[in-house]
Amino acid sequence: MEEQHTGTSPARGGTPWRRRSGWGGGGPSRWRGGPSRWARSDEGAARSRWPWRSTLLCTVFVMVGSNAADRFQEAGHTQLGSYGRLLLLLGSGLLLWRQRYPVLVAFGTAATAMVYLGAGYPYGPVFLTVALGCFSAVVAGHRGAAWAAVGMLWVGHLLVAHWLYRWLPPPGDGADGWGQEVPVAAWAVAIVAVSELARVRREQWARERAERARAARRRADEERLRIARELHDVLAHSISVINVQAGVGLALLDSHPEQARTALTTIKAASKEALGEVRQVLDTLRAPGDAPRAPAPGLDRLPELVEQAAGAGLTVEVEGKAPPLPPGADLAAFRIVQEALTNVVRHSGSRQARVRLEREARALRLRIDDDGPATGADAGGSGNGLAGMRERAAALGGRIEAGPRPDGGFRVLAVLPLGAPPAKSHEAEEDR
């Protein structure tokens, strides 16, 4: 504590505030750690705990500092007795409720400090309780209450220092000069400014936490959709082949057992392949950070897809050759062709389909046609399969057009960019 003896009788609002400005100036450094602790803690958990430790530390500091001020300050103030110490304990003890009732604590500490000043007790760290009370109110969102509490204390100080001093202890006290109010105003503004800064930082941290939570949910949704698309494409195609071959096998089991054996062999191969791809998808769920055990399918497996379609009774003609594609575009192109052929098997009366691959300037153009007619109300695959194709193309910045042709049949047209995928999709791939 720094002392500057002026040789004049001290007044309540003037010289002591300037002489002991170190008490107020040391406060903000103690409060600087507050917002980060509150930002890291859950608000409900923070309110359920009592701040015993910080309140006890503040009480000890206020009591020791006030006793030192009573001992070392020059004459001209009321000696710090039992009533003064009770006021100090009351102001510090109110801080125990600052997280539960911040408004009441802000006004309570300001009122206690105002009574303390009016009684003529020595200046000291009693104003720290006001600072902490108003700080808690601002951080909790009660800015108006905090400003009102500080303003109430300042008005009370003005009344005591310039008017009520005639009737208040100590005897023979004089009025302060108005120029001494500048440090008082600066001290009050500093309290509120630091509190506002803490409130803004806390809101910023809350927004960042909410944004991180939204980003995590968005990544989880994208991953769930990706896995749903993979499972749908794998199972829909393989089960369609199995269903057709099972019908063929049942029809030929008695009359042509050798041909039925061929159908059963196709069923075995299709089910084995489906199990392998489903297992690969499930492995990514169990260990999302590990590399896949098998490479993702691409258009290099198009002949295999044509062979499987032939086993289901569908003749597929392929025109054109696929250019080198990034892994994501290669997988999307393969799945789109696979789903389109599956829809032909399931929903078209035609037993022929055409797949055409064309390279444009910076895109791959896929066209899958069948001559129809449609068989069933959901012809053309207007359910999850078509939605999955659109999602795959959109994730790469491409597009899907699907619908009946003017001359009959159905057409699926996909345009997939050959360049780098959009930033959002690229980030999603990195997150996975």
Image (tube, rainbow, N blue to C red):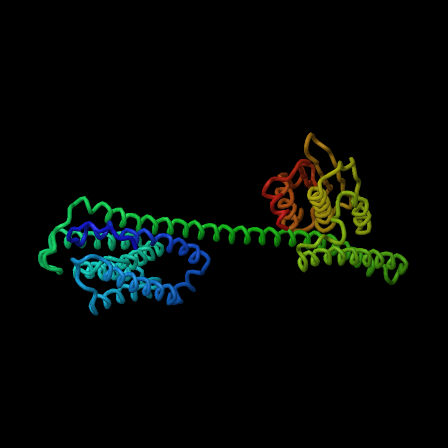
Q: Give the percent coordinates (x, y) of residue 1.
A: 30, 55
Going by the image, does 234 lie left or right of 106? right
Expressed as whole percent of the image width and height from the top left, the position of residue 180 reads: 20, 46
Image location (x, y in percent) of residue 173: 12, 55
Give the residue displayed 79% in from the left and 51% down from the top: 312
Query: Which x, y percent locates residue 17?
Result: 23, 51
Q: Please report the residue visible at 39 percent of the width from the left and 64 percent of the height from the top.
A: 47
* Residue 348 visible in the shown view: no
Q: Is residue 344 left or right of residue 304?
A: left
From this view, report whether residue 384 is shown above or below residue 371. below
* 66 left or right of 36 in image: left
Whether 368 is drawn above or below 225: the answer is above
Residue at left offset 24%, top offset 47%: 183
Q: Among all residues in the image, which is located at the extreme bottom?
A: 82
List the single residue furthest toward the top: 361
Using the image as rendered, state which of residue 258 and residue 228 is in the foreground: 228
